[in-house]
C-alpha cells in the first residue's frame, strides 16, 4: 500500500487490513521494507522496529519482530540518520552514504519478505513516503522498487482531508514509469467527510483517466489517534487525543515539550487516555506556565535538543518549575537532560555537556545501544516498559523511581521531578494512576481524581478493531483479496508520464 504523501493513512489502513484478514482466519504479517521514524519499539528478539509495524503486528495477533521492518532510519539531524538493519544500529548515514548501501539493503529486504511470504497466508506491505518521489527512484527499496522486485500489486492511498486528492492520485500515477504504472491497481481515498455522492463524479473521471478503480472511500474517524507513525502527528498547541470529562472536579493539564528531534512521542498518549487529563505539545516557554505537569520526552539528538531547550527559554522555565516544587517528567533523552552532566562522544561528539542540573544524575553515552524490554516494580505495583538509548547512568544521587525485576534501581525522583529511561512506563495503568495522583497533589489540583478503570492496552485494541471495521465497511475487500491472490491485473493502461515522455 503506497501513499500520495507521508501521513496519507498507509500505516493505519495496513493495520486495519491486517486485523480484518486475521479476524477472517488468515495468517497475516505486516512488512515495511524501510521506515524513517524516531518512534520505535523493542522486539522480542532484542532489536527495534518502527512503532507502526509493531501496531500492525498486534493487529495480526503477532509479537513485533525485526522481520516486519528490516530497515529503519532514525533522523538525528536534517542530513544524517542512524541506520538500523534487522533491528541493530550499524552506522550513521547521509544521502550519499545510503546510496552505497543500497545493494546490500536490497538483499536484506528481499530475503526477509520472501521468508514471510512462505510463512504466512498474506503479507501486507506498506510503502514509505510517496512512490512519486522520482528523484529517489533509483535507490527506492520500499515503494515501486519493492513492488517491481517482488511483483506486488499496489494500491495508492490519498488523504482527502488535505484537499486535492484526485490530483494527488492522478499525479502520483502519472510521474511513474510505464513499468511501475503496470503494478498500480487501484486507489483508496482516506479521511472522507460528507456526502459521498458529491465525490462520485470525480472518482468516475479518475477511472476514465487512469483505467483504475477506486477501491474504497474511508470515512474520517475522529476517535483514531493512538500510535502516531512519526513526528508529523506531533503538532504544538493541538490537544493530544480526545480527552473525556474529569472524574473529579478538576482537570489536570499536561504540557509535553515538542523537541525538534522528538522520539517515541507516543509515550504521552497514555496520559491523554485518562479522563480529565488534557495533554498538549508545546514549543514555547510561555506554554509551561499554566501546566500541572511538564513532560520532556525522548529525543534522537539529546545534546542538540538540550541546546534548543536553552535557546527557546524552556530550560530556564524547567529549572524554575523544579525550584518551585512543580511536577516534571523526563523520559529517556528528556531524563538525561534533567541531569547534571552528559558525556557524549557518540551521538553528538560534544564531549562533556552541562545538563539542566535538576536531577543529581551523570550520564555517559556508549557506542552500543541498549535495546531491552523490561519489567519491574514501582510504588508496590508492577510496571513494564522498554529501553532504546546509548546513554548509561554513571552516577545517580537521587532515590530511584522504580526497581527492575532483578532488583536494580532505575530512574530518579527528586521532589516533584520524575525521570526514567523506560519508554512505555506510563502505559502501566496502576502506576500511571499513582503518578497522576502525586502530580495533582504537588500541583495543588486537589479536585482531580484519577479514573479507576482506564486500560490503555484495551483502548489500543479497540482502535485496531475500529480500523478493521472501517476497512470492512468502506473498502472493496473482495477486490483487495483478488489482488493479494492474483497480483496486479494485466493490461492496465499507461498514462502520459514524465519519465517515458508519453503513454
Image: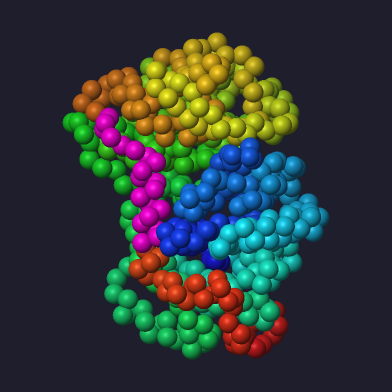
Is residue 390 shown to the viewer in this render?
A: yes
Q: Residue at x 54, y 29 (%)?
A: 374
Residue 370 drawn at (x, y percent): 64, 31
Numbered range of the magenta stretch: 450-469
**Which residue is nearer to you in this view: 92 or 112?**
112
- In reply to whether residue 455 is colored magenta, the answer given is yes
Is residue 309 shown to the viewer in this render?
A: no
Is 324 displayed left or right of 275 in the figure?
right
Q: Residue at x 60, y 32 (%)?
A: 372
Vertical side of 209 occupied by 227: above or below: above
Is 427 displayed left or right of 211 in the figure?
left
The part of the image, by quadrant, that contains residue 377 is top left
- In reply to whether residue 98 is colored magenta, the answer given is no
Chief secondary structure of the magenta portion? helix
Q: Quadrant of the N terminus?
A: bottom right
Q: Residue at x 33, y 31 (%)?
A: 290
The part of the image, by quadrant, that contains residue 383 is top left
The part of the image, by quadrant, that contains residue 447 is top left
Amino acid at each position: 500500500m503506497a501513499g500520495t504523501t507521508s501521513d496519507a493513512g498507509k500505516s493505519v489502513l495496513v493495520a486495519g487490513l491486517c486485523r480484518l484478514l486475521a479476524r477472517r482466519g488468515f495468517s497475516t504479517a505486516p512488512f515495511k521494507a524501510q521506515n524513517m521514524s524516531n518512534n520505535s519499539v523493542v522486539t522480542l528478539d532484542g532489536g527495534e522496529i518502527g512503532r507502526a509495524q509493531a501496531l500492525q503486528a498486534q493487529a495480526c495477533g503477532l509479537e513485533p519482530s525485526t522481520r516486519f521492518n528490516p530497515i529503519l532510519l532514525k533522523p538525528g539531524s536534517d542530513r544524517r540518520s542512524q541506520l538500523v538493519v534487522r533491528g541493530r544500529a550499524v552506522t550513521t548515514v547521509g544521502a550519499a552514504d545510503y546510496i552505497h548501501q543500497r545493494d546490500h539493503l536490497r538483499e536484506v529486504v528481499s530475503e526477509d519478505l520472501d521468508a514471510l511470504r512462505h510463512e504466512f497466508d498474506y503479507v501486507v506491505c506498506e510503502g514509505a513516503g510517496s512512490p512519486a518521489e522520482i528523484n529517489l527512484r533509483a535507490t527506492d527499496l520500499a515503494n515501486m522498487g519493492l513492488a517491481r522486485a517482488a511483483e506486488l500489486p499496489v494500491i495508492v492511498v490519498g488523504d482527502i482531508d488535505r484537499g486535492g486528492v484526485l490530483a494527488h492520485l492522478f499525479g502520483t500515477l502519472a510521474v511513474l514509469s510505464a513499468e511501475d504504472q503496470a503494478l498500480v491497481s487501484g486507489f483508496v481515498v482516506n479521511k472522507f467527510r460528507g456526502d459521498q455522492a458529491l465525490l462520485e463524479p470525480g472518482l468516475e473521471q479518475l477511472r476514465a483517466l487512469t483505467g483504475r478503480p477506486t477501491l474504497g472511500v474511508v470515512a474520517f474517524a475522529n476517535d483514531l489517534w493512538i500510535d502516531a507513525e512519526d513526528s508529523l502527528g506531533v503538532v504544538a498547541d493541538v490537544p493530544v487525543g480526545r480527552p473525556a470529562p474529569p472524574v473529579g472536579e478538576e482537570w489536570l493539564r499536561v504540557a509535553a515539550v515538542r523537541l525538534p528531534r522528538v522520539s517515541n512521542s507516543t509515550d504521552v498518549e497514555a496520559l491523554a487516555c485518562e479522563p480529565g487529563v488534557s495533554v498538549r505539545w508545546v514549543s514555547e516557554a510561555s506554554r509551561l506556565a499554566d501546566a500541572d505537569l511538564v513532560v520532556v520526552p525522548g529525543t534522537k539528538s539529546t545534546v542538540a535538543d538540550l541546546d534548543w531547550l536553552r535557546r527557546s527559554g524552556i530550560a530556564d522555565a524547567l529549572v524554575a518549575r523544579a525550584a518551585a516544587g512543580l511536577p516534571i517528567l523526563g523520559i529517556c533523552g528528556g531524563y538525561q537532560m534533567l541531569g547534571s552532566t552528559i558525556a557524549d562522544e557518540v551521538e553528538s561528539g560534544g564531549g562533556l555537556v552541562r545538563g539542566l542540573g535538576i536531577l543529581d544524575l551523570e550520564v555517559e553515552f556508549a557506542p552500543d545501544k541498549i535495546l531491552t524490554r523490561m519489567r519491574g516494580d514501582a510504588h508496590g505495583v508492577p510496571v513494564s516498559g522498554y529501553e532504546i538509548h546509548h546513554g548509561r547512568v554513571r552516577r545517580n544521587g537521587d532515590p530511584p523511581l522504580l526497581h527492575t525485576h532483578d532488583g536494580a534501581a532505575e530512574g530518579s525522583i527528586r521532589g516533584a521531578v520524575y525521570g526514567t529511561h523506560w519508554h512505555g512506563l506510563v502505559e502501566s495503568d496502576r502506576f500511571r494512576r499513582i503518578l497522576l495522583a502525586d502530580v495533582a497533589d504537588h500541583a495543588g489540583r486537589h479536585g482531580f481524581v484519577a479514573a479507576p478503570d482506564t486500560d490503555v492496552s484495551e483502548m489500543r485494541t479497540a482502535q485496531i478493531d475500529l480500523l478493521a471495521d472501517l476497512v470492512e465497511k468502506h473498502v472493496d475487500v473482495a477486490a483487495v483479496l483478488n489482488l493479494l491472490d492474483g497480483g496486479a491485473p494485466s493490461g492496465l493502461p499507461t498514462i502520459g508520464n514524465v519519465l517515458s515522455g508519453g503513454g
